Image (tube, rainbow, N blue to C red):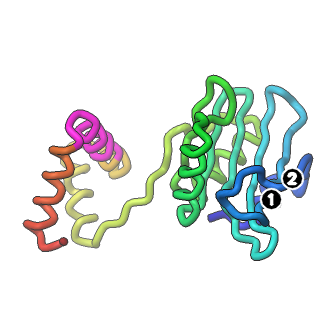
C-alpha cells in the first residue's frame, strides 16, 4: 500500500482540502486529504489514512478529462468498506456515469496517477501480479515463444480466457480448479 509520504510526493505536497472521513468503516481517526488541479477537466487525488498510526486505507486518482477513476483499497480494510457500502445501500461509484477501476499494485497506481497529473496518455489496463516457479516460468515462456507472442501477451491471454470461462460457468470453473488442485496435491 502506498505510504502517505509517497502520496504527498505524487501531489507535490499540494493539498487543496482535508476532512474527517465520513463513514465508520475505517474507525474514528480516519482522515482524507485531497489534491485537486483546480480544473474540471483536470485531475484529483485522495488519500484516506488513520491520524494515529498513519495506516493508509485507500488512495484514489480521478481523471476528469477522460472520465476515469482509479483506486486501491487496503486489502486488510476492504471488507469493512464493502460492508458499509452494503449497509448504507449506496452505489459504489466516484461520480455519475463513472465506475471505479480497482487496481492491484502500487506501481500501476503510480504510473497511471503520474500520467494523469502530467496530462499524458496511459495504459488503462489493470496490472496483476503473478508468481511462478522457475520451472513454470520457463514452460510458459517456451509456450509463448511457440505461439510467436511475448510472455506478457501470453499471460494476458491466459488470464482473459480464465475470466471468460469463469463468467460463462462459475461453478464449473471452481470445480475444475478444485479438482486440479487435488490432482496436484495443492489442497
Instruction: Please identify the residue farthest to the top as the structure is shown.
Output: 97
Rendered location of residue 87, percent (x, y) = 57, 46
Rendered location of residue 45, percent (x, y) = 77, 46
At 26% from the left and 44% from the top, the residue drawn is 162
Instruction: Please identify the residue farthest to the left as the structure is shown.
Output: 183
Q: Which residues are magenta?
A: 156-170
Whole-angstrom CA distance, mark 2 to mark 1, is: 6 Å
- Disc sitting over residue 178 in the figure: none
> Which residue position holds label 1?
31
**Residue 6 in view of the camera:** no
What kind of element bears circle 2?
Answer: strand
Rendered location of residue 79, percent (x, y) = 52, 57
At 55% from the left and 66% from the top, the residue drawn is 76
At 80% from the left and 74% from the top, the residue drawn is 52
Prevailing secondary structure of the magenta residues: helix
**Residue 110 in view of the camera:** yes
Quadrant in which the N terminus is drawn: bottom right
> Which residue position holds label 2?
19
Instruction: Please identify the residue farthest to the front as the structure is shown.
Output: 87
Q: Residues within 10 Å of mark 2 (few under 14, many from 20)?
A: few
What kind of element bears circle 1?
Answer: strand
Residue 22, compared with residue 185, is above or below; it is: above
The question of residue 164 being in magenta is answered with: yes
Does 84 sit left or right of 151 as displayed?
A: right
Asked if the residue at tag 1 contacts the one at tag 2, i.e. Cβ–Cβ closer than 8 Å, the answer is yes
Nearest to the observer: residue 111 or residue 28? 28
Nearest to the observer: residue 30 or residue 111? 30
Rendered location of residue 33, percent (x, y) = 83, 54
Image quadrant of residue 56? bottom right
Nearest to the observer: residue 116 or residue 150? 116
Q: Residues within 10 Å of mark 1 (few under 14, many from 20)?
A: many
Amino acid at each position: 500500500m502506498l505510504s502517505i509520504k509517497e502520496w504527498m510526493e505524487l501531489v507535490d505536497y499540494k493539498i487543496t482540502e482535508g476532512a474527517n472521513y465520513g463513514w465508520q468503516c475505517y474507525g474514528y481517526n480516519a482522515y482524507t486529504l485531497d489534491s485537486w488541479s483546480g480544473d474540471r477537466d483536470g485531475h484529483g487525488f485522495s488519500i484516506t489514512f488513520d491520524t494515529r498510526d498513519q495506516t493508509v486505507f485507500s488512495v484514489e486518482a480521478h481523471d476528469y478529462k477522460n472520465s476515469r477513476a482509479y483506486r486501491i483499497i487496503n486489502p486488510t480494510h476492504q471488507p469493512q468498506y464493502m460492508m458499509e457500502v452494503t449497509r448504507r445501500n449506496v452505489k459504489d461509484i466516484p461520480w455519475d456515469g463513472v465506475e471505479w477501476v480497482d487496481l492491484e499494485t502500487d506501481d500501476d497506481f503510480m504510473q497511471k496517477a503520474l500520467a494523469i497529473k502530467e496530462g499524458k496518455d496511459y495504459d488503462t489496463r489493470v496490472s496483476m501480479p503473478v508468481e511462478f516457479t522457475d520451472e513454470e516460468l520457463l514452460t510458459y515462456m517456451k509456450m509463448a515463444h511457440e505461439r510467436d507472442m511475448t510472455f506478457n501477451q501470453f499471460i494476458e491471454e491466459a488470464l482473459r480466457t480464465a475470466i471468460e470461462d469463469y463468467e460463462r460457468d462459475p461453478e464449473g470453473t471452481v470445480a475444475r480448479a478444485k479438482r486440479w488442485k487435488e490432482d496436484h496435491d495443492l489442497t
